Amino acid sequence: MALFQRARVHMHMLFYREQPIFTTRAHVFQIDPSTKKNWVPASKQAVTVSYFYDVTRNSYRIISVDGAKVIINSTITPNMTFTKTSQKFGQWADSRANTVFGLGFSSEQQLTKFAEKFQEVKEAAKLARDKSQEKIETSSNHSQESGYETTSSTQASSVNGTDDEKASHAGPADAHLKSENDKLKIALTQSAANVKKWEIELQTLRESNARLTTALQESAASVEQWKRQFSICRDENDRLRSKIDELEEQCSEINREKEKNTQLKRRIEELESELREKETELKDLRKQSEIIPQLMSECEYVSEKLEAAERDNQNLEDKVQSLKTDIEESKYRQRHLKVELKSFLEVLDGKIDDLHDFRRGLSKLGADN
């Protein structure tokens, strides 16, 4: 269905001679139809968004295709407005499609260019609409004037009863009708040529549609074939993966056994080395057991010396304690002497001050005598 929709848009562009006038890339969004607030991504990644100009209809459209899916097909009208909602995001409402499109750009410059092009295309659509309205009004006025002239001429000919007057009035009317008839013939010829041209183009489009249908059927068949091959490859891949998992499990078990064997060998070597060390220690102990009686006698002698040393140590500790007591007493006496000396020095300072005062009094008396 998506491929058919894309082919239909492509045929429409070929039939109406649409030409791209501006192209950019952006992320496409549509407003959520249920909430009318949240944005729903229409494309998984940035896609091409283009302005197209329809030469025959003199109209402009914005078209974007994501793979085989047409996500934007919006005809621009003068009433549309493109609004920048942020530095890199813009939106416009399409009443015909009954939705709101949003575009997210990678830079603010791209958004500005797209908005400027939207305004330019909108102005061009407005001018095209005004020109078409003017042409319609001009053609309607021209048809009304020609009808009025024909009616007036027929009325004048009916009122004037002479043959000369009839001939004089019928001449310009026939000439006008003849010119109109020639114009109609030319228009008919042109329309016939256009019909032939459109028939040729319609036949071409039918052939291209048939080719597209054939290609679509072939692609569908190839897709089914690829799906079957993909299913077979996927099953084979799953089988190989399970086999690889089994082999990896077996390899891991072999590696674990190897590690266990290595650890056991290492443990055996450690035990053998410990056994040799124990045997060496046992030999040393046997040699030492031979000298145990001598060691016992030496130990008793050392014990006696140790006891004597402990007694001497106790005596020395007693002497040290007595010396500490003497030192404390001497320190106390020194502190007491210091206090007494300090009080004596204070008394001596007072006496010396008194002597100085007495000397000054004697000097003063001598001076008075």
Image (tube, helix red, strand yellow):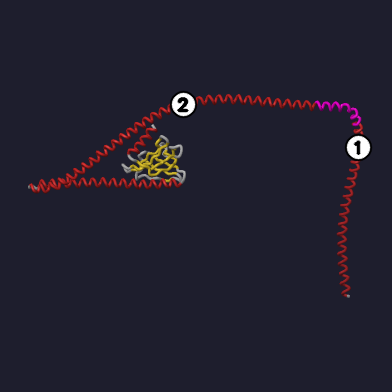
Neighbour class for label 1 at 10 Å: few (<14), some, many (≥20)?
few
Q: Is residue 281 magenta?
A: yes
Residue drawn at the location 28% of the way across and 46% of the way down: 133
Taking the view exactly as shown, the residue that stands out farthest to the bottom is 369
Residue closest to the eye, 292 or 306: 292
Q: Element type at marker 1? A: helix
Stretch in magenta: 279-298
Position of 19 with respect to 276 (left or right) is left
Left or right of residue 290, residue 237 in this image: left
> How busy is the neighbourhood of tag 2: few (under 14 within 10 Å), some, or many (20 plus)?
few
The location of residue 128, given as percent across then percent down, is 31, 46
78 relative to 163 in the view: left or right: right
Rendered view: 243 above or below 41: above
Which callout, 1 or 2, points at the residue further toward the start of the chain? 2
As drawn, is 11 to the left or to the right of 111? left
- In the image shown, does 278 or 339 lie closer to the viewer? 278
At 91% across and 41% down in the image, what residue appears? 316
Q: Position of residue 200 (x, y in %)?
A: 29, 36
Amino acid under label 2? Gln
The residue tagged with tag 2: helix, strand or loop?
helix
Quarter of the picture containing the C terminus is bottom right
Say whether residue 152 is visible.
no
Label 1 is placed on what type of residue? Ala
Q: Reply yes or no: does residue 289 show up in magenta.
A: yes
Residue at x 12%, y 48% (from the top left corner)? 169
Q: Residue furthest left?
A: 162
**Horizontal and vertical percent for residue 217?**
38, 29
The residue wearing badge 1 is 309
> What residue is shown with label 2?
229
Q: Is residue 340 visible?
A: yes
Q: Nearer the viewer, residue 100 or 126?
A: 126
Mark 1 to mark 2 CA distance (whole Å): 102 Å
